[in-house]
Image (tube, helix red, strand yellow):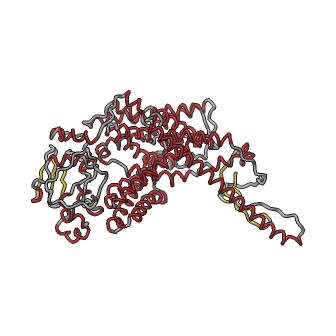
C-alpha cells in the first residue's frame, strides 16, 4: 500500500540527560521541514492548475482562429484533447522528479487496509492516509511519478464540480418547442434505446471476454455484470461536436431536436442504469450468477432512483420559483442571481447525499428553472444566469476533454488489450445501430412526419461519446476489469470525437440533409398552408397536452408572473385564496396575455386556453372558437397561429421578458387595441 506522510520520522540516539533538549530541538526542526514541504506542495499544485489554465487558454485562441477561418473539420473538444495529449507526453517522458531520500519502506501484517494509519515513533504519533495500491515493481518509482499523480484529479471532482454545470446548462437551454413536439421519439431513443444499447454491448463484450479467456489474454476477473456496466457507460452519447456544427449550419430543427433531446436524457439514463447494474447482488456466495429476484430488485432500484431524482430536481426548481415569486429579490439582481446559482447547484449535491443521482436531478431542475423561475427573474438576472451557465458549461466541458488527453499518458494503471479494444469498437457500433434503426422503424409506424433514412444515418453517425462516458469510467478504476474499461473508453471517445465529429459536414453533404434552415421561416410557411396543414400537424405533443391545461391554468399563476389570474381559473368559492396567490402584474397586463408554451401543442386534440374572461378553444380539426366579452377582434386564427410559430421568442407578459428578443426580420404581432395596451417598462 502507498501512504502519504503527514509528519517526519526523526530518531534520536543522544544520551538520556540531553533527551529533553534534543526533543525540543527536533520538534522545531520538524516544524521547519514540514512548512517547507507544505510550501513545495503548494507550488506544485499551483503549477499543475496553471497547466490546465494554459491548455484552456490555448484552446480558446485556436478556436477563434478556426472560427475566423471557418474550419469545421476539428471541433474545440477534439482540439482540447490534442493539447492534453501533448502535455501528457511532456509530463510522462520529458520531466523527471528526483527521488526523495527520506522515503522509508516498512513491512507490517494487517488483515485489511485502513484509510488512516497512526504510527507511534518514540511516543509521537504520525498520521498517514491511504493513497491506493501499487504493484511491487513500482515501489521504487513512487517519487518519480509524483508529478503524474499530482495532475490526476480525484474522480469526485468531475461529479461534484465539473458535471453539474454541464448537465444544468443542457436543461436550462433546452428549446422546449422542438423538444416537446418530438418528445415521444426522444423518450423512446433515450430510455428504450439506451437499455437496448447497453445489453447489446454487454452481450457482445461478454462473448469477447470469453474468447479472450480461452486464448489466455485475460489477466484478471471479468464478469458479465462488468460487461453490462461497460455497456451502460458507453451508451451515454455526447454529440457536442455535431450539435455545435448543426447550430452553426442551421440544420433541420427536427433532426437537431432528436439528437439533442436524446443526448440530454440518455446521459441521465446511463448514470442510473450503471448504478442499478452495480447494485445487482444475488444471494449466496457467487455474486455473479443470474437470479430473477436480484434482477427485479435492480430494476426497482432503477425506477426508484430515477423517479426520486426527478422529483427532487423538480421540487428544487419549484422552491426557487416560489422564493423568487413571493420575495422582492428582483430588486437586488446580484442576490437574485447568487440564490439562483446556489439553489441550482445544491440540487446535484442534495440528490447525491440522499442516495439519488445528481445528474438526473440537476437536469430536471434546469428544465423547471427555465419553465418557471426564469419568468420571475429581473431582465438583468435572466441575462446573467444564461451567460453564467453557458460560460461554466464551456469551461467545464473543455477542461474535461483536455484532461482526457492528459490521462492517456499520466494515468498509472492503464490496461490496453487489443482484442478487447477491437471488440469494444464493434460492439459500440452495433449497439448504436440496434438503438437507432429498429426504434426509428417502430416510431415511423405512428408518426405522420417520418424519420427519414438520411436522418437515421446521421443519428447513427452522430452517436459520439464524451464527458459523461469518461466521468463514469474514471469513477472506479480499482479492479483489473475497470482499468481495462477506462483505457478502452478513452480510445472510444478519441475516435468518435475526432473521426465522427470531424466528419459531420461531409456526412451532412453525403446524406443530402438541408442546411441553412430558419425554423421560424419554416413555421411561417406551415401557417400559410392553412387549416388542412394544421389539422394534420404531426409535431403535436400528445403527452404534453395531458398536463398542459393544468400547468397553464394553475401552476404558472402560482409559481410565476406569466400565467392567467387565478381568479379567472379557480372556482368562485376559492376567490380569497385566488386573490392572495395572484401576482399584481397578472391584472395589469391581462388584456395582452400570450402563453409562451402554446406553441408546443398544435391542434391534435381539444385545448382550452383561458386568458382572463377569454377562452380560446382549439378542436381536432384545427378550428379556433372563442367566448367572452373582451375577445372581439382580439385573437383571430392567424394571430394565434403566429403565436404558435414564434412562441420561443420574447413575448411581453406582465412586464416580464421570457426567452429571447425578437429579430427585426420577424413579422410583428398585430395589435388589435393599439390604444389600450399598457407600456412595457423594459422597453
Q: Residue at x 66, y 48 (%)?
A: 147
| Residue 226, percent from left and from top | 54, 42
Q: Position of residue 667 (x, y in %)?
A: 21, 46
- Res. 31 image quadrant: bottom right
Left or right: 56, with 196 as reference point: right
Residue drawn 76% across and 66% down?
A: 124
Please indicate whether residue 407 sits to the left or right of residue 596 in the image. right
x and y percentages locating residue 208 in the rendered image: 54, 32
Residue at the spot 78% in from the left edge and 54% down from the top edge:
102
Using the rendered image of the protein, determine whether residue 109 is visible from the camera's viewpoint: yes
Residue 556 appears at what percent x and percent y? 27, 59
Vertical side of 569 occupied by 190: above or below: above
Q: Quadrant of the C terminus?
A: bottom left
- How many numbered discs sit on the rendered protein? 0
Question: Could you tell me if residue 555 is visible in this image?
Answer: no
User: On the image, which quarter does residue 430 sit in?
Assistant: top left
Viewer-nearest residue: 672 or 222: 672
Q: Quadrant of residue 515?
A: top left
- Which sits in the foreground, 287 or 24? 24
Instruction: Answer with left or right where residue 103 lies relative to residue 594.
Output: right
- Residue visible at 60% across and 48% down in the picture: 51
Amino acid at each position: 500500500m502507498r501512504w502519504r506522510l503527514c509528519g517526519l520520522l526523526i530518531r534520536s540516539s543522544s544520551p538520556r540527560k540531553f533527551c529533553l533538549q534534543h526533543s525540543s530541538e527536533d520538534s522545531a526542526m520538524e516544524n521547519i521541514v514540514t512548512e517547507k514541504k507544505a510550501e513545495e506542495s503548494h507550488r506544485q499544485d499551483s503549477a499543475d492548475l496553471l497547466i490546465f489554465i494554459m491548455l484552456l487558454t490555448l484552446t480558446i485562441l485556436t478556436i477563434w482562429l478556426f472560427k475566423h477561418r471557418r474550419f469545421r473539420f476539428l471541433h474545440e473538444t477534439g482540439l482540447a484533447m490534442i493539447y492534453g495529449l501533448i502535455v501528457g507526453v511532456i509530463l510522462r517522458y520529458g520531466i523527471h522528479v528526483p527521488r526523495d531520500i527520506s522515503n522509508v519502506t516498512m513491512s507490517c501484517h494487517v488483515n485489511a487496509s485502513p484509510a488512516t494509519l497512526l504510527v507511534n515513533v518514540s511516543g509521537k504519533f504520525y498520521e498517514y492516509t491511504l493513497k491506493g495500491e501499487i504493484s511491487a515493481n513500482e515501489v521504487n518509482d513512487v517519487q518519480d511519478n509524483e508529478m503524474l499523480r499530482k495532475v490526476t484529479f480525484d474522480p469526485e471532482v468531475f461529479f461534484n464540480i465539473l458535471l453539474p454545470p454541464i448537465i444544468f446548462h443542457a436543461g436550462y437551454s433546452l428549446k422546449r418547442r422542438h423538444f416537446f413536439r418530438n418528445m415521444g421519439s426522444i423518450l423512446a431513443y433515450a430510455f428504450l434505446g439506451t437499455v437496448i444499447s447497453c445489453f447489446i454491448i454487454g452481450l457482445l463484450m461478454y462473448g469477447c471476454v470469453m474468447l479472450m479467456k480461452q486464448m489466455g489474454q485475460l489477466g484478471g476477473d471479468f464478469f458479465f455484470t462488468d460487461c453490462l456496466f461497460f455497456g451502460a457507460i458507453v451508451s451515454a452519447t455526447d454529440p457536442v461536436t455535431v450539435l455545435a456544427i448543426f447550430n452553426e449550419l442551421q440544420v433541420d430543427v427536427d433532426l437537431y431536436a432528436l439528437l439533442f433531446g436524446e443526448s440530454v436524457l440518455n446521459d441521465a439514463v446511463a448514470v442510473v442504469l450503471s448504478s442499478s447494474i452495480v447494485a445487482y447482488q444475488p444471494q449466496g456466495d457467487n455474486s455473479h450468477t443470474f437470479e430473477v429476484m436480484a434482477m427485479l430488485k435492480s430494476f426497482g432500484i432503477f425506477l426508484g432512483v430515477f423517479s426520486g431524482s426527478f422529483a427532487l430536481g423538480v421540487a428544487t426548481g419549484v422552491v426557487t420559483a416560489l422564493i423568487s415569486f413571493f420575495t422582492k429579490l428582483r430588486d437586488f439582481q446580484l442576490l437574485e442571481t447568487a440564490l439562483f446559482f446556489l439553489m441550482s447547484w445544491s440540487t446535484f449535491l442534495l440528490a447525491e447525499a440522499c442516495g439519488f443521482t445528481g445528474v438526473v436531478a440537476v437536469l430536471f431542475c434546469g428544465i423547471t428553472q427555465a419553465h418557471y423561475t426564469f419568468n420571475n427573474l429581473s431582465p438583468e438576472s435572466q441575462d446573467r444566469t444564461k451567460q453564467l451557465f453557458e460560460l461554466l458549461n464551456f469551461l467545464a466541458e473543455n477542461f474535461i476533454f483536455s484532461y482526457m488527453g492528459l490521462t492517456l499518458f499520466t494515468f498509472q494503471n492503464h490496461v490496453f488489450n487489443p482484442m478487447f479494444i477491437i471488440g469494444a469498437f464493434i460492439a459500440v457500433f452495433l449497439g448504436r445501430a440496434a438503438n437507432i434503426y429498429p426504434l426509428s422503424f417502430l416510431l415511423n409506424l405512428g408518426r405522420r412526419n417520418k424519420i427519414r433514412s438520411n436522418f437515421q444515418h446521421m443519428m447513427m453517425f452522430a452517436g459520439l461519446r464524451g464527458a459523461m462516458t469518461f466521468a463514469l469510467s474514471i469513477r472506479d478504476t480499482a479492479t483489473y476489469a475497470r482499468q481495462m474499461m477506462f483505457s478502452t473508453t478513452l480510445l472510444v471517445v478519441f475516435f468518435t470525437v475526432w473521426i465522427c465529429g470531424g466528419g459531420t459536414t461531409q456526412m451532412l453533404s453525403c446524406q443530402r440533409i438541408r442546411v441553412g434552415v430558419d425554423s421560424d421561416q419554416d413555421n411561417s410557411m406551415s401557417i400559410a398552408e392553412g387549416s388542412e396543414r394544421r389539422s394534420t400537424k404531426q409535431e403535436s405533443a400528445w403527452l404534453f397536452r395531458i398536463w398542459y391545461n393544468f400547468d397553464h391554468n394553475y401552476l404558472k399563476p402560482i409559481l410565476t408572473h406569466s400565467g392567467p389570474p387565478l381568479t379567472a381559473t379557480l372556482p368562485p368559492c376559492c376567490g380569497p385564496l385566488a386573490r392572495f396567490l395572484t401576482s399584481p402584474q397578472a391584472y395589469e397586463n391581462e388584456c395582452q396575455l400570450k402563453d409562451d408554451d402554446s406553441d408546443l401543442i398544435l391542434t391534435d386534440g381539444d385545448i382550452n386556453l383561458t386568458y382572463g374572461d377569454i377562452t380560446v378553444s382549439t378542436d381536432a380539426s384545427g378550428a379556433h372558437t372563442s367566448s367572452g366579452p373582451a375577445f372581439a377582434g382580439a385573437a383571430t386564427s392567424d394571430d394565434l397561429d403566429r403565436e404558435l410559430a414564434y412562441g420561443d421568442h420574447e413575448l411581453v407578459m406582465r412586464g416580464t421578458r421570457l426567452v429571447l428578443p425578437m429579430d427585426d426580420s420577424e413579422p410583428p404581432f398585430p395589435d388589435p387595441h393599439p390604444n389600450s395596451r399598457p407600456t412595457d417598462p423594459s422597453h
